[in-house]
Amino acid sequence: MKTTKIYSCLVISLIAIALLSGCRKDPYNGVTSNERSIEAFTLASGQIGPAIIDRTAGVVKINVLIQQGTDLTKIIPTVQSSYKAQLSPASGEAVSFATNNETTYKVTAESGETREWKVQLIPFVETLLGTYDVKGLMVYGGTGVEYGGGGVIGLQTKPVWPAAGPAAELDNVLTFTYSGSTADGKTYGTITNDAGADGLYANFLFTSTPQTDVNNFYRKIPKGNGKWSRDYTANTVTFTFADETTTVGTFAGAGTESLGNGLTKTIADQAFVFTLNGVDNYGAIYSDYDKIVSHPRKYWIDVKKRN
């Protein structure tokens, strides 16, 4: 009997809630909207990150990759305006940005009040795009760097590799092409790592004692074809191999980096830079084995972009 009473009370409560909900009125019913803003602006391709909307100034700015030959006279964006407002030109209608990379929209509120908005394309340059020659493979490593155990060495200069060692990469050519960008502003595309005239890629097999395969440290860029993506917020470049494994580094311009303890690394043009995670080995301190195999710390693939 007690269970029946609880069940009955529950049913009555649900009915009461439903009746009350049915009596609620639309809070905006009868209210005429004066809102006349652009809330979102999206291009079909080339946009880097969400539009920057300045409601005070009535200006929308879109970072966009404008490549050579891009037709700015027939851009078809998707535009979201305020509730019950009307857009002119309408969302999905072709507009021209040919004059100063800018166009104008008029937003008309439900009340009939209007506001003009300037929409500006801000040219974005993806600096990765293009073709690069590989110039050198450099590593900073060593145990006890505070005791002089560290060093910066060119992998290709050491006689500790098979015939197709790091020197095989010095005629390689890297070509980056653009495919698109994500909603949060990451750019992405494809990379071709051409083996060059010798047709060889490096086999990073340390042949001195003890022989050790260190391809996991130094094969950072895919052989042949792969994919890349760039995160400007984290300042990273991610390479994706054919088997979907990835490596993550940075892209650096010319300059000299202090590594501490009197060591530096100079980038003449550009370089892809990777942090390596070796471990101390005091039994091999001061040796090439220690710097290259046991405790490599940082790795640079020096490149030079073709004009």
Image (cartoon, rainbow, N blue to C red):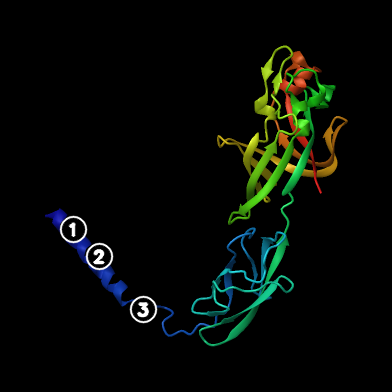
Which residue is identified by label 2? 14
**Label whose residue precedes the other's in the sequence (1 or 3):** 1
| Total tally of numbered discs in the picture | 3
Q: Are marks 2 and 1 in contact (CB under 8 Å)?
A: no
Residue 169: image location, x then y, percent:
75, 31
Is residue 90 shown left or right of residue 11?
right
Is residue 164 shown left or right of residue 256?
left
State how far apart marks 2 and 1 are (Cα): 11 Å
> Visible in this render: residue 136?
yes
Seen from this angle, which residue lies furthest top? 209
Q: Mark 3 is on which residue type?
A: Lys
In the picture, which quadrant includes the N terminus? bottom left
Which residue is identified by label 1? 7
Q: Quadrant of residue 30?
A: bottom left
Q: Are marks 1 and 3 in contact (CB under 8 Å)?
A: no
**Label whose residue precedes the other's in the sequence (2 or 3):** 2
Q: Quadrant of residue 146?
A: top right
Nearest the camera: 296 or 128? 128
The residue tagged with tag 3: helix, strand or loop? loop
Q: Mark 1 is on which residue type?
A: Tyr
Residue 237: image location, x then y, percent:
67, 43
Q: Residues within 10 Å of mark 1 (few under 14, many from 20)?
A: few
Is residue 196 shown left or right of residue 226?
right
Q: Are marks 2 and 3 in contact (CB under 8 Å)?
A: no
Q: Which mark is residue 25?
A: 3
Identified at 66% across, 51% down, the residue is 178
The residue tagged with tag 2: helix, strand or loop? helix
Q: Residues within 10 Å of mark 3 (few under 14, many from 20)?
A: few
- Taking 166 as reference, is 282 above or below it? above
State how far apart marks 2 and 3 are (Cα): 19 Å
State how far apart marks 1 and 3 are (Cα): 30 Å
